Image (spheres, rainbow, N blue to C red):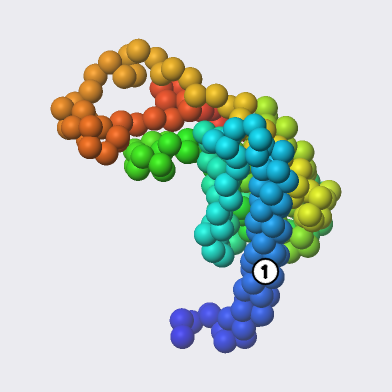
Amino acid sequence: MKKGISEGKILETLTGKSTLKQQIFDNTSAAFKLLKEELYLITDELNKKLVNVDPRIMLQFQDHGEFNAELKVAGDLLFFNMHSNIFQFDRDHEIWKTDYIKDDPLAGYSGIINMYNFLADSFKYNRTEDLGYLVARIFINKNNHFFVQGKRQSGFNYTTMGANVIDQKSIKEIVGASVQYCLDFDLLVPPYDAVKLVSVAQINQNISDAKLTTGKRLGFQFKSDDVDR
């Protein structure tokens, strides 16, 4: 064993930080299960009201196991991913300036649930070059406290760690806000200069596999400074 590294120090880290990360993983996993339950419920509730409107706009929920789920809403697809690892915020992040984290730095370790917006046609037609956008991220800590980092226009609440405990009510609000944001986030015509050149290979691929790149903001900047930190 390397000089200066004691068995006691290793045991201390295992029983401290490693146990902490396991607890955060359990909390995040439980929250993701609540999220999938809400996705099922919103699908069931809205479809009952849409059945006589147009079957093409009915919601479709798919559970892809422990870490992934998706919700198709008309022409949009929301993809939800729980990361299997636990993270600490970098030292420049605003969270370190809060009294909550200053009083308990271990509360700064978080699990993450990501929410991405894709075009449903990207998967329907196997357009593997198409782009998806990160709509929001949910950070959950050892105390089951959480906050949501997302686009400012999205209507997500819960932007302060330590102020709220994640539960079914908050999950319902997050899912509702993410669905509404995606419906309001329209597909824009790309600038002419962004699509004026195309290769023979792209055309051939497009004929056989529909692989010309498409995204809601193709050719436009999806600015990181438009994100709540």
153 versus 159 height, above or below: above
- Which residue is the extreme one toward the front? 52
187 versus 27 height, above or below: above
Residue 115 in percent (x, y) is at: 58, 45
**Going 55% across and 50% down the picture, which residue do you hit?**
70
Q: Secondary structure at mark 1?
A: helix
**Going 56% across and 84% down the picture, which residue do you hit?**
6
Residue 225 appears anywhere in the view: no
Position of the C terminus by quadrant? top right
Residue 176 appears anywhere in the view: yes
Residue 77 in percent (x, y) is at: 53, 41
Q: What residue is pinned by disc 1? A: 26
Residue 154 in percent (x, y) is at: 67, 32
Label 1 packing within 10 angstroms: few (<14), some (14-19), many (20+): some
Decide if residue 154 is on the left or right side of residue 193: right
- Which residue is the extreme one toward the left? 200
Decide if residue 143 is on the left or right side of residue 186: right
**Going 61% across and 79% down the picture, which residue do you hit?**
14
Residue 197 in percent (x, y) is at: 24, 19
**Going 61% across and 54% down the picture, which residue do you hit?**
112
Decide if residue 76 is on the left or right side of residue 45: left
The foreground one among 119 and 227 is 119
Q: Quadrant of residue 103?
A: bottom right
> Residue flagged by tag 1: what amino acid is it?
Asp
7 versus 90 height, above or below: below
